[in-house]
Image (spheres, helix red, strand yellow):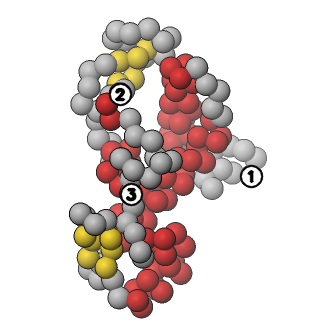
Amino acid sequence: MDKAMDGTFTGDSVSSYEAVKQATEIVNLVMKEAFSVDANYNRYIKLRERFETFSFLISCPEVNWDRWENILHAPEEFWEDVSERFPIAKAYEHAGEPNFTALRGIFQGCRPSSSKKINTNGSSGSSDKSVVIDVDEIVDLSSGSE
């Protein structure tokens, strides 16, 4: 984890943690829930690991990604070698990342297409403290489908 022993965050993880903290505040406000910042940050770290691992795999010349079937084809020795370096890579040997499009949107900075805004105070409209949320693009990553 990116967390230091004393509970502080260092380097690039500071901005990630702060972004998750802000997002958690907005999600809790909009959804009237009480999600924990630390739990959401742990989810963020796991999703980032999935995205980075799958992105790495599809960039390897030994791998052929069938996007329609969402299957990665590679020699057996490739899977043996890569799973030593990336433990979750083995999960992609028989099925691709079902949420790759959504993960790419999160981690490559794609912007939502909608102009609907929700202010941090919960009202609609535009503000310096508003976040663009495209409700048509919200994906339930726990369901395994987009």
In the rendered image, which quarter is residue 64 located in? bottom left
- The N terminus: image quadrant: bottom right
C-alpha gap between disc 2 and disc 1: 38 Å
Circle 1 residue: 5
Q: Nearer the viewer, mark 2 or mark 1?
A: 2
Kindly identify the amino acid type of the residue bearing the numbered disc 2. Val
Rendering coords of residue 28 (x, y %)? 57, 24
If you read the primary sequence from the N terminus, does the residue marked by circle 3 or circle 2 appear first? Answer: 3
C-alpha gap between disc 1 and disc 3: 34 Å
Q: Is residue 22 visible?
A: no
Q: Position of 93 compared to 15: left or right?
A: left
Circle 2 residue: 135
Front-lying residue, 88 or 1: 88
The residue that appears at 31% across and 79% down in the rendered structure is: 73
Q: Is residue 2 above or below residue 8?
A: below
The residue that appears at 31% across and 31% down in the rendered structure is: 136
Front-lying residue, 3 or 30: 30
Rendering coords of residue 60 (x, y %)? 31, 76
Kindly identify the amino acid type of the residue bearing the numbered disc 1. Met
Question: Extreme right residue here?
Answer: 6
C-alpha gap between disc 3 and disc 2: 20 Å
Mark 1, secondary structure of its residue: loop
If you read the primary sequence from the N terminus, does the residue marked by circle 2 or circle 1 appear first? Answer: 1
Rendering coords of residue 85 (x, y %)? 51, 77
In the rendered image, which quarter is residue 126 located in? top left
Circle 3 residue: 98
Q: Nearer the viewer, mark 1 or mark 3?
A: 3
Q: Position of 136 compared to 13: left or right?
A: left
Q: Position of 90 compared to 106: left or right?
A: right
The residue that appears at 44% across and 8% down in the rendered structure is: 123
Q: Are marks 2 and 1 in contact (CB under 8 Å)?
A: no
Mark 2, secondary structure of its residue: helix
